[in-house]
Amino acid sequence: MSTTLAITDPLPLRNSTRSIPRLGFGVYRIHGKECVQATGAALKAGYRHIDTAQFYGNEKEVGEIVRTSGIPRDEVFMTTKIMTPAGSPEATYQKAVDSVDKIAGKDGYVDLFLIHSPSSGQTGRKQLWQALERLVEEGRAKSIGVSNYGIKHIEEMKAYAKIWPPDVNQIELHPWCQQPRIDRYCKANGIVIEAYCPLVRANKFNDPTLVGLAKKYEKSTAQILIRYSLQKGWVPLPKSSTPDRIISNADVYDFHISKEDMGILDSLDQGDAGVVVESVSDD
């Protein structure tokens, strides 16, 4: 990967005219004024990709700061997610519409809408996907995808999906949880892979291997982890509520991790034992 990449450089989405910026800003567990300030700091630092969800409880705040930022709407890529269906196809669709309204207003849109989890079962997954397809038809979502989906969940969609494959699969990814099977599958099918928990929630910042590489490249451990994700072809979604760290996490475009050192980071994979949140079930 070239060292000339920039924070706004995009990846194409298979089923959309929109492209997704290669670095996103996550807002999990950031609420109220703190969320507004953190998202505003991210936009000022150059992030143009914000990732929220119904489950996070901060869609309204994210939408507010983007609308009042002075940045043209088409220059900010906004993602949200729906966790579970609402009991009927119409109610599930309305639950998704409510998110778009919170973020972008009655006439607005989101750039990407994901199913947050496959946990609602085959019937629930179908209902959720068909609700998101309806959003696309109506122009309220530019692209749709999934999160925490394994191969079996994505293959299952072929039986009912008008839009297949999903544009994105957002899963936990970092050196200790690399999920190579779903990684290969998504890349083979043109599915963009987003990496949540790319900083391992700071649990590994004192890891000797990581610390050694940070010293070698004169970067922070967080910067090494984000650059690793970028060079793996993933779209990392680092989260922070601290302005200095938000800025630092975006300062990853003036160095390149060597092939040898990428291999060292690859060797840290612990499979399911390295998981912070969850690994996908892809049998």
Image: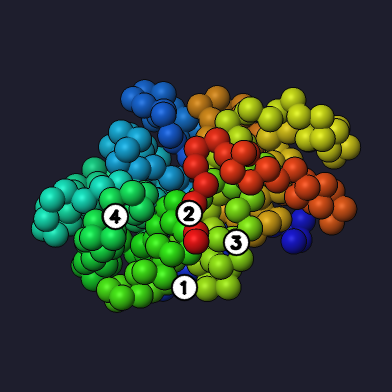
Q: Which mark is residue 281?
A: 2
Residue 237 to residue 168: above or below: above
Say which residue label 1 marks. Answer: 14
Residue 39 percent across, percent down from the top left: 45, 35
Residue 24 percent across, percent down from the top left: 52, 47
Q: Earlier in the sequence, mark 3 or mark 4?
A: 4
Q: Amino acid at mark 3?
A: Arg
Q: CA distance from mark 3 to mark 4?
A: 22 Å
Give the residue displayed 54% in from the left and 66% down from the top: 186
Nearer to me, 56 or 43: 56
Say which residue label 3 marks. Answer: 181
Q: Earlier in the sequence, mark 1 or mark 3?
A: 1
Q: Earlier in the sequence, mark 1 or mark 2?
A: 1
Q: Work out which residue is located at the far front of the displayed protein and give it.
A: 283
Q: Label 1: few (<14), some or many (≥20) within 10 Å?
A: some
Q: Amino acid at mark 1?
A: Arg
Q: Amino acid at mark 4?
A: Gly
Q: Amino acid at mark 2?
A: Ser
Image position of 242 (left or right of 31): right
Q: Which mark is residue 121?
A: 4
Q: Earlier in the sequence, mark 4 or mark 2?
A: 4
Give yes or no for contact between labels 1 and 2 (Cβ–Cβ under 8 Å).
no
